[in-house]
């Protein structure tokens, strides 16, 4: 057995087993490329393009008026071009529970906007499946499988670059899907290889924590503190004096950084005399911009520590910036979006090739594989669209509104899975109906947005707000594509499911 033959089985099963999970990870990561634009779309208060006039001191004043518990720390981030509003988070002392709010930029004083999952939902789904550390480990394992599948796929396809120029959509099912698998695999190969590697590499300290635990006697937080840059001062257990203006400390930090923008501002032990303020430098448009930190005494404003990013942390930031498209602006994020969609198409094509090869054997279990394909490949996008519908239809005053949006997503996905199981023996009809439903969902969202928010598509285009308009434009494009594909499936007569390889291939 030569190398190519030995790699064939590795590619088949190394790519097949995690393929449904990889689809979820890649699809969520693709949507997360524009998570901040999606955050704006899901918050109607941000549709008018108003620039916030609030300051860091205003945000802190709101926290002091509305949160009476003793805090371990609180942190905030000012408005940016992609997120034109203040964000605030805090941790109540001794609870390890975190709260977050975002403030409406239209008022002179901070007022929280209705809560929503926003685009952050897809970012968390991408890197830990909303399952904490366990989910993060599962995603890391899937990333390693993807690296194996990519390298082995390159080895077994001797004519992969020649086949790149061959696409025969009207050929028999297996040939057409193989052409599509090769095409999207070659187009996105460098991108997928780099993203799979960096996705695993940036969490390597979490996947393999033994070195840090041994070197720091089990105190892993000390390790991360030294790597990222932090200054710790023991609590004095004495009442804190009147705090220094946070806006003044932000202005001083900009001066020390020669005009560089400020990112996160955090205050540790704000109710204690030992309180300190950390001001972190915001990453720029270049990949791997160092996020240096200045630490001040919260009362006097004295500069206590200046932490510049270490060489190792700069390397980590470079890898993280490359993986998360934190450079190059909207054009690079659009490229990541297209390459992510190519990755999804590559997975769909690969699984269809696997199915087409085995359909002539009369294996009844393939019906359930088809049901799983429909549940994941079509169910996840449809559930994501349902989440956006829930965001618009759930009242702004509804208690635990973000949780309700999450249940809309989960409920919709479960219904899609049940539908796929019930229609598992007529996959062509199922796919046609799923495409029609996707078209209705996607094309209806811009209309619903216009009825429930001031920032409808025409208004966004009129004031040149392409960041907000891009969400509606993408939904319209996706809806039209779904409609065109559904018409194509409607034009082709559905064939009866009778034994025989020829008919089964046509149904692929």
Image (cartoon, rainbow, N blue to C red):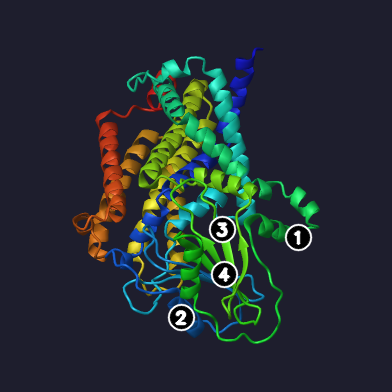
Q: Which residue is drawn at 39% across and 35% down?
A: 426
Q: Quadrant of residue 387?
A: bottom left
Dots 3, 2 in contact, CB < 8 A? no
Residue 427 in the image, given as x and y percentages of width and height: 40, 35
| Gap between marks 1 and 3 measured at Cα | 23 Å
Q: In which quarter of the image is the C terminus?
A: top left
Q: Is residue 420 above or below residue 161?
A: below
Q: In which quarter of the image is residue 133?
A: bottom right
Dots 4, 2 in contact, CB < 8 A? no
**Foreground: disc 4 or disc 3:** 3
**Foreground: disc 4 or disc 2:** 2
Residue 409 in the image, given as x and y percentages of width and height: 44, 56
Q: Can residue 236 be seen in this view?
A: yes
Q: Which of the labelled discs sits on residue 98, or is there none?
A: 4
Which of the two residues, 421 or 354, is positioned nearer the viewer here?
354
Mark 3 lies on residue: 292
Q: Quadrant of residue 36?
A: bottom left
């Amino acid at each position: 057995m030569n190398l190519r033959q030995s790699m064939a089985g590795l590619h088949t099963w190394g790519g097949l087993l995690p393929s449904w999970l990889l689809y979820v990870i890649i699809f969520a990561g693709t949507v997360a490329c524009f998570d901040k634009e999606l955050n704006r779309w899901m918050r109607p208060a941000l549709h008018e393009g108003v620039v916030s006039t609030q300051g860091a001191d205003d945000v802190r004043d709101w926290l002091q008026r509305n949160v009476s518990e003793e805090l371990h720390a609180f942190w905030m981030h000012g408005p940016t071009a992609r997120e034109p509003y203040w964000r605030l988070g805090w941790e109540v002392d001794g609870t390890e529970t975190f709260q977050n709010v975002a403030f409406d930029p239209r008022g002179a004083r901070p007022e929280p906007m209705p809560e929503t999952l926003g685009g952050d939902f897809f970012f968390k789904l991408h890197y830990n499946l909303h399952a904490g550390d366990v989910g993060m480990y599962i995603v890391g394992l899937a990333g390693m499988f993807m690296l194996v599948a990519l390298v082995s796929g390159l080895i077994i396809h001797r004519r992969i670059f020649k086949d790149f120029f061959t696409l025969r959509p009207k050929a028999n099912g297996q040939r057409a899907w193989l052409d599509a698998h090769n095409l999207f695999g070659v187009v996105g190969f460098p991108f997928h290889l780099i993203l799979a590697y960096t996705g695993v590499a940036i969490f390597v300290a979490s996947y393999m924590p033994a070195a840090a635990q041994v070197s720091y006697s089990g105190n892993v937080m000390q390790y991360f503190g030294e790597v990222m840059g932090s200054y710790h001062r023991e609590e004095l257990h004495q009442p804190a004096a009147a705090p220094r203006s946070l806006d003044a400390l932000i202005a001083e930090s900009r001066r020390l950084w020669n005009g560089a923008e400020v990112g996160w501002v955090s205050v540790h032990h704000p109710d204690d005399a030992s309180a300190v303020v950390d001001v972190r430098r915001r990453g720029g448009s270049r990949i791997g911009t160092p996020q240096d930190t200045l630490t001040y005494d919260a009362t006097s404003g004295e500069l206590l520590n200046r932490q510049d990013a270490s060489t190792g942390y700069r390397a980590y930031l470079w890898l993280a910036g490359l993986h998360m498209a934190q450079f190059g602006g909207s054009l690079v994020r659009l490229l990541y979006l297209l390459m992510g969609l190519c990755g999804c198409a590559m997975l769909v094509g690969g699984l269809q090739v696997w199915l087409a090869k085995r359909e002539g054997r009369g294996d009844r279990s393939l019906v359930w594989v088809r049901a799983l394909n429909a549940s994941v490949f079509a169910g996840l996008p449809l559930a994501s669209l349902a989440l956006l519908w829930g965001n618009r239809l759930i009242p702004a005053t509804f208690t635990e509104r973000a949780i309700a949006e999450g249940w809309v997503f989960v409920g919709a996905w479960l219904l899609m899975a049940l539908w796929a199981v019930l229609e598992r023996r007529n996959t062509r009809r199922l796919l046609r109906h799923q495409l029609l439903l996707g078209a209705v969902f996607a094309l209806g969202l811009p209309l619903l947005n216009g009825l429930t928010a001031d920032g409808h598509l025409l208004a966004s285009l009129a004031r040149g707000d392409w960041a907000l308009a891009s969400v509606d434009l993408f939904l319209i494009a996706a809806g039209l594509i779904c409609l065109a594909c559904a018409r194509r499936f409607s034009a082709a007569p559905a064939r009866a499911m009778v034994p025989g390889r020829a008919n089964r291939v046509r149904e692929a």
